[in-house]
Amino acid sequence: MAVREDRGGHPSSRLLNAETAGSALRLNPQQAASALVAGHLAILPTETVYGLAADARQPATVARVFQVKGRPTDHPVIVHVGSAAAIADWSANTPDVAWKLAETFWPGPLTIVVPAAASVSRVLTGGQDTIALRCPAQQQFLEVLDHMSRRQGLASAVAAPSANRFGQVSPTTAADALRGLRSRLSADDVVLDGGACQIGVESTVVDCTARPIRILRPGRIGRRQLAEVLGWDAVAAVGTGTSTTAADESEEQVRVPGTLPSHYAPITPVSVVDAATLSAYGRHPNTTDRVIGLIAPASVATPVGLHRIGSPANSRDYAHGLYSWFRRADDLGCSELLVALPLDPVDDPLADAVADRVRRATHPPTT
């Protein structure tokens, strides 16, 4: 079988080496923690997507994360901590709203952006004076942090952006993460297999330095849930809010992961369609000459000539399956992938998150 190459021109089917190929997926959290403390990278499961982790207190190792991912150095990473109490290790003058959100939603799929402490390496923050923090709701991940803390004698944390090449589809299984990154990892880097991710799309990111706070990236936790804790006046509608940070005083918004116009994109070109457009594709004379994939709610019929890839029953199914369906379209060699969004996204944070990821996948790649 021919070796398929990723966007960087690197083989995506080469194993790390004979030893790690057989053992990496059988590691336990204690072994993963040992590798991280020793200055190596680890692919770790979270409830959202798999992350490429490094000890957050080792800037040189964090820099390797950027290299392996091909990530711009001015694009910040999320630092994952073991509890809300750990915010004090990474943030100075932390807003009260950040504490309230962490105490309510952590562990969970919520990332808070807060002022970074002076001691925090700007490698983590992309050169900004803010830092993104999250406590994931994944038991093995939390065990890794616990084992690291025991070895280091302090509350440990890891920098862990999604375990994929920058801008491409996030992995929701360990196998997908290895498939995209194994040729760039060293023999001492490790993988912890936690099974398929529960949610399937990245965390909600909230700017807690703004007044009112702003949702910078949609995820499973939406505005209504935030407002139930803080009040409606404290949570800006999407695209609004006035920041109190120095960055915004110069009309520059806080940079956070996953908010570039082009992101989360498969190799297959993606187009958003509605039911009427789908009917037109079914009558198109050229559809028999190429494989056109379709992701659409289960209630939407599949037009003749299209290859059904995903049939989510609801937004939860949609979020859970989206990235694996993107990968399936690539594996099938589809010439195009049509995506019909969830039918009723009103007040549904996961539907909003799916629409956000699909929209970014349709955007031409950043050059």
Image (spheres, helix red, strand yellow):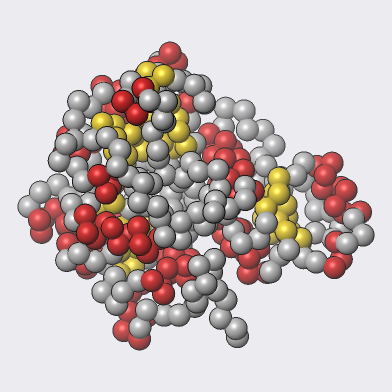
**Residue 94 in the image: x percent, y percent?**
23, 27
Please give left or right for residue 355 compared with residue 34 in the image: right
Q: Position of residue 136 (x, y in %)?
A: 33, 46
Q: Is residue 361 above or below residue 63?
A: above
| Residue at x-position 50% and y-position 67% | 8
Q: Is residue 300 visible?
A: yes
Q: Quadrant of residue 327?
A: bottom right
Image point 86% across, 47% down: which residue? Answer: 279
| Quarter of the figure that contains the N terminus | bottom right
| Residue depicted at x 68% and y 69% | 332
Q: Quadrant of the C terminus?
A: bottom right
The percent coordinates of residue 192 (x first, y second) are: 33, 65
Residue closer to the observer: 7 or 232: 7
Q: Quadrant of residue 221?
A: top left
Residue nearer the viewer, 293 or 69: 69
Q: How many marks?
A: 0
Query: In terms of depth relative to the viewer, which is nearer, 137 or 186?
Result: 186
